Image (cartoon, grey):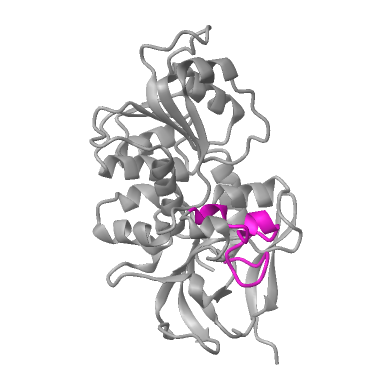
């Protein structure tokens, strides 16, 4: 008799159905994970609410869980062990070989099969997940499953810091974080623990501005309170920034961030959403600005994130909602996240 599990299945734009689906048995080199927690990512919002996702797909890739069963040729992982997921990079393409695995040709986004599981389009908004054994990461002793579920989005934030080519020391660097949603908060917290003292956050919703200050921002403004973008590309704002981290994915925030950079400044794009943006090319040229994306993680990103989470240096309770939601509450939580009503990372406990 086929074993069944509950899962949140995309049924159309803005629709989730909680269905009973089959639990897959682990094959060679695979592990079956009982999901403890799974974070809700901005990509999950786009896939579910905006119609980006595949009908019938199960979302969720920011998970922690315990090994429930192992397939043949799996070593070093025991049943009951707490693990988190990482991407199924190939390890052999030109990008993996030069230490740029976030550009791996086998990355799920590039192959059109989003998700970090062994079954395409079947993620961790479910009771169980099938994963390649070589993609899971063991959780350090003493780190709980709830906190460990932050490892994937924290790894994204840390990759953004790498892309920013930040100076050392960092204290005097003027930094703008555009958007104080869950990813923006992780960027702010990571910057604070690295010594940044002049982080300004631009965020329209009051709860998120308040949370950003607790997470480590020095100043929290509404977007309208930011300095004016100079009218001419030959001019730069006296209150401009050395680095802008754009985490909202909003087109207007991207163009504003670029306009507020000081000469040689760097705009790091982390947020998804904007499909087409007008950038002031002559401003980039005259001020020798850098615009870069930051997709996925550093090669050691998941383990780096686990180490930082285990250190106790991050304000976890300012980054996570106090209570997890069940699968039945997932769609409501997504809608509340989209409008900024929930300031912190939402965790699902399937």
Residue at the limit of the structure toward the bottom, as seen here:
1
Q: Nearer the viewer, residue 42 or 13?
A: 42
Q: Nearer the viewer, residue 136 or 327?
A: 136
Residue at point 44%, 57% (across, down)? 299
**Count of residue discs:** 0
Q: Is residue 161 left or right of residue 38?
A: left
Residue at point 45%, 24% (across, down)? 222
Q: Is residue 4 visible?
A: yes
- Residue 62 placed where, x, y %? 50, 60
Provide the residue span drawn in magenta.
100-124
- Residue 325 placed where, x, y %? 51, 60
Quadrant containing the C terminus is bottom right
- Residue 100 placed where, x, y %? 49, 53
| 122 is within the stretch colored magenta | yes
Q: Main secondary structure of the magenta part?
A: loop
| 151 is within the stretch colored magenta | no
Q: Is residue 39 visible?
A: no
Vertical order, 72 against 321 (above or below):
below
Quadrant containing the N terminus is bottom right
Residue at point 49%, 74% (across, down)? 134
Residue at point 64%, 69% (across, down)? 7
Vertical order, 326 against 179 (above or below):
below
- Residue 129 placed where, x, y %? 57, 73
Q: Nearer the viewer, residue 107 or 71?
A: 107
Vertical order, 173 against 108 (above or below):
above
């Amino acid at each position: 008799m086929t074993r069944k599990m509950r899962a949140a299945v995309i049924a159309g734009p803005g629709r989730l159905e909680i269905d009973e689906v089959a639990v897959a048995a682990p094959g060679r080199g695979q592990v079956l994970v009982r999901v403890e927690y799974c974070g809700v990512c901005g990509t999950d919002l786009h896939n579910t609410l905006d119609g980006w996702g595949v009908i019938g797909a199960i979302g969720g890739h920011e998970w922690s869980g315990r090994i429930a069963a192992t397939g043949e040729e799996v070593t070093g992982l025991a049943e009951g062990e707490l693990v988190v997921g990482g991407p199924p990079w190939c390890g052999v393409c030109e990008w993996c070989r030069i230490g740029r695995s976030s550009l791996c040709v086998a990355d799920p986004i590039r192959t059109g099969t989003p998700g970090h599981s062994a079954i395409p389009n079947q993620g961790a908004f479910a009771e169980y997940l099938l994963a390649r054994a070589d993609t899971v990461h063991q959780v350090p002793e003493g780190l709980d499953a709830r906190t460990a579920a932050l490892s994937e989005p924290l790894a994204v934030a840390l990759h953004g810091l790498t892309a920013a080519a930040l100076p050392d020391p960092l204290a005097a660097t003027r930094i703008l974080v555009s958007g104080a949603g869950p990813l923006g908060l992780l960027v702010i917290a990571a910057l604070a623990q690295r010594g940044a003292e002049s982080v300004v956050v631009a965020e329209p919703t009051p709860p998120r501005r308040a949370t950003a200050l607790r997470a480590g921002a020095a100043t929290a403004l509404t977007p309208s309170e930011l300095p004016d973008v100079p009218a001419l590309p030959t001019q730069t704002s006296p209150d401009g920034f050395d680095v802008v981290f754009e985490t909202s994915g909003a087109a207007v925030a991207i163009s504003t961030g670029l306009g507020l950079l000081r000469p040689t400044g760097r705009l790091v794009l982390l947020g998804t959403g904007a499909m087409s943006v007008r950038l002031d090319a002559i401003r980039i040229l005259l001020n020798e600005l850098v615009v870069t994306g930051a997709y996925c993680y550093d090669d050691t990103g998941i383990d780096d994130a686990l180490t930082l989470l285990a250190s106790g240096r991050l304000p976890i309770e300012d980054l996570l909602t106090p209570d997890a939601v069940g699968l039945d509450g997932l769609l409501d939580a997504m809608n509340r996240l989209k409008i900024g009503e929930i300031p912190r990372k939402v965790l699902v406990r399937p």
